[in-house]
Image (cartoon, helix red, strand yellow):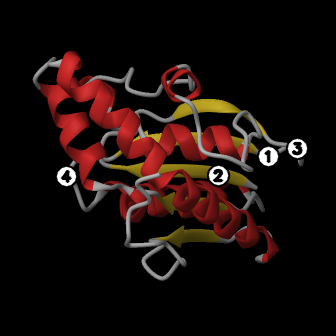
């Protein structure tokens, strides 16, 4: 089993999802500013990193966890899926690969903060918005990771693409 979390930039909700998946962040409470900002790759990737698979670690079951930023392209995940199928067929591999979209968890504060910080280099405005957004969406990211891990019950050798549009994600942002 290989897990690959993806979204637009690959540096915010994907980084949080990978950290939750790898048990690097607490799931029983809201994250602190320090925990958010020290999460591996959180707000650290550049536009030039889009499309690169970033390895985050191996989970408790021995499964590698990656992230990828896909930019505005709608073809990155289908291309990765087709490449995965080709490689599995060619090399007779039976490794299940799960592509999990974290975009449904992204709150407005994170979208604006990411744009200001990563694109405009205005960290003094963008980073506080990113922290606010991360605090707002942490419960949703945890739910998404739980949903993603359940995909492991699929048959060996399958390629699973989770858009996560129907995951029980709260559309009301938690402001506490």
- The residue lying at 37 percent from left, 59 percent from top is 103
Distance, label 3 to label 4, CA atoms, is 32 Å
| Residue topped by disc 1 | 63
Q: Residue beneath label 3, please?
A: 60
Secondary structure of the residue carrying tag 2 is strand
Q: Nearer the viewer, residue 131 or 38?
A: 131
Closer to the chain start, of discs 4 and 2, is 2
| Element assignment for label 4 | loop
Reading the image, the residue beneath label 2 is 3
Q: Residue furthest bottom?
A: 166
Q: Position of residue 144 (x, y in %)?
A: 58, 64
- Residue appearing at x 35%, y 38% in the figure: 51
Quadrant for residue 62, please give it. Answer: top right
Structural distance between the alpha carbons of marks 4 and 2: 21 Å
The vertical placement of 52 against 159, above or below, is above
- Mark 2 or 3, closer to the camera: 3
**Residue receiving disc 4:** 72
List x then y, in percent, for residue 20: 67, 44
């Amino acid at each position: 089993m290989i897990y690959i979390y993806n979204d637009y930039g690959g540096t915010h909700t994907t980084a949080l999802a990978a950290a939750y998946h790898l048990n690097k962040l607490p799931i029983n409470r809201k994250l602190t500013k320090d925990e958010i900002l020290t999460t591996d790759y959180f707000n650290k990737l550049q536009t030039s990193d889009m499309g690169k698979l970033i390895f985050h670690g191996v989970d408790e079951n021995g499964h590698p966890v990656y992230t990828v930023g896909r930019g505005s392209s709608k073809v990155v995940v289908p291309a990765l899926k087709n490449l995965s199928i080709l490689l599995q067929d060619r090399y007779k591999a039976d490794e299940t690969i799960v592509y999990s979209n974290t975009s449904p968890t992204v709150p407005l504060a994170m979208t604006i903060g990411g744009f200001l910080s990563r694109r405009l280099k205005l960290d003094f405005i963008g980073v506080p918005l990113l922290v606010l957004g991360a605090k707002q969406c942490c419960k949703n990211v945890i739910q998404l990771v739980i949903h993603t891990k359940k995909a492991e019950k699929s048959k060996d050798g399958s390629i699973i693409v989770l858009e996560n549009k129907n995951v029980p994600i709260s559309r009301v942002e938690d402001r506490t």
